[in-house]
Amino acid sequence: MEKQHKIAFIGAGAMAEAMIAGMTKTLYKPNQLIVTNRANKDRLSYLANTYGVRTETNKQQAVQEADIIILAMKPKDVANSMAEFVSSIREDHLIISVLAGVATDSIVELAKKRVPVVRAMPNTSAAIGKSATAISLGKFANEQHLAIAKSLFETVGLVTVVEEHHLHAVTALSGSGPAYVYYLVEAMEKAANEIGLESNVAKSLILQTIIGAAEMLKHSPKHPSALRKEVTSPNGTTEAGIRVLEAYRYQEAMIACIKRAMERSIELGKELIAMTK
């Protein structure tokens, strides 16, 4: 990735901030990144003060200066947002979309040019360089564009290349995945409080437990079920807890959660197509 490339973020929400945080810690200088959003000047001031990036209220100006455009607005806003700067899009731009559910063909249509598009699904762990990101190419993107996008997202974590039709599943699994883990931790912290542990003690124990379990999963050749059984002594405390999770259909709930998130990703894409007809 050439360090002189300028990148315009269209959208300044949580995902944009996570990427900015990760990118400015690694390959990119803050002045290479231009950030703009719909109307929230306070948000732009915060990003400028926190990360040293440039901000711009004029989207056309930001796009004109950039080599790479990162679409990071809400999926429902993409059509209206792109209409504001479509005249500034060039065919030598690279558009990278991190929008859940939005197909590369839809973005090409909104751009009204044969512009290369790479669709990506990172997650907010990009802020600490630990994102799990999947990327796929649009019809006008080539291997060079893939290399640029891969290099960019490797600054914020692990990158996997997939066929675009798999990105709905990726969105549900790893794109939304951190929220599922945080939701679990919320429950563990509430339980710790109810059984009398101090919050600071509980937090450190919970975090190290999750980190340790993740490392075990990463480095052990054993299936997760085998690792679980190693912790679960017959008639012991873990088995008692697991029985409650089974009674509440914990695994079934998680499977249904991921499937519904995937369905919603598909719905978002269809909603955009309907809006642009």
Image (cartoon, helix red, strand yellow):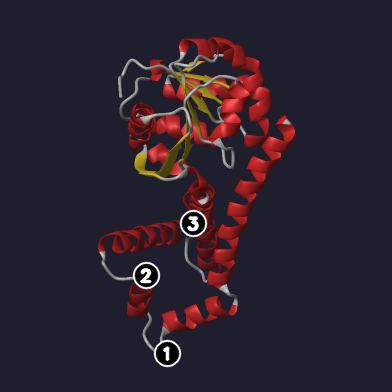
Q: Against 276, is 166 above or below?
A: below
Quadrant in which the C terminus appears = top right
Q: Secondary structure at mark 3?
A: helix
Q: Secondary structure at mark 1?
A: loop
Of tags 1 and 2, the one toward the viewer is 2
The image shows a total of numbered marks equal to: 3
Please tell me which of labels 2 and 3 falls first in the chain. 3
Q: Nearer the viewer, residue 244 or 70?
A: 70
Task: Identify the residue shown where x is 41% and y is 31%.
Answer: 21
Of tags 2 and 3, the one toward the viewer is 2
Where residue 102 is drawn, which disc sits there? none
Task: Identify the residue shown where x is 39% and y is 19%.
Answer: 30
Q: In this rendering, would 32 be left or right of 265? A: left
Where residue 181 is drawn, which disc sits there? 3
**Cα gap from disc 3 to disc 1, whole angstroms:** 27 Å
Q: Residues within 10 Å of mark 3 (few under 14, many from 20)?
A: few
Do the residues under discs 2 and 3 have CB atoms within 8 angstroms?
no
Q: Quadrant of residue 253?
A: bottom right
Q: Nearer the viewer, residue 253 or 263?
A: 263
Q: What residue does disc 1 label?
A: 235
Please tell me which of labels 1 and 2 falls first in the chain. 2
- How far from the left and from the top, in percent, is residue 110? 62, 25
Residue 38 appears in the figure: no
Q: Nearer the viewer, residue 206 or 85?
A: 85
The type of residue carrying mark 1 is Asn
Q: Nearer the viewer, residue 71 or 110?
A: 110
Q: In this rendering, would 92 be left or right of 73? A: left
- How far from the left and from the top, in percent, is residue 165? 51, 47
Q: What residue does disc 2 label?
A: 224
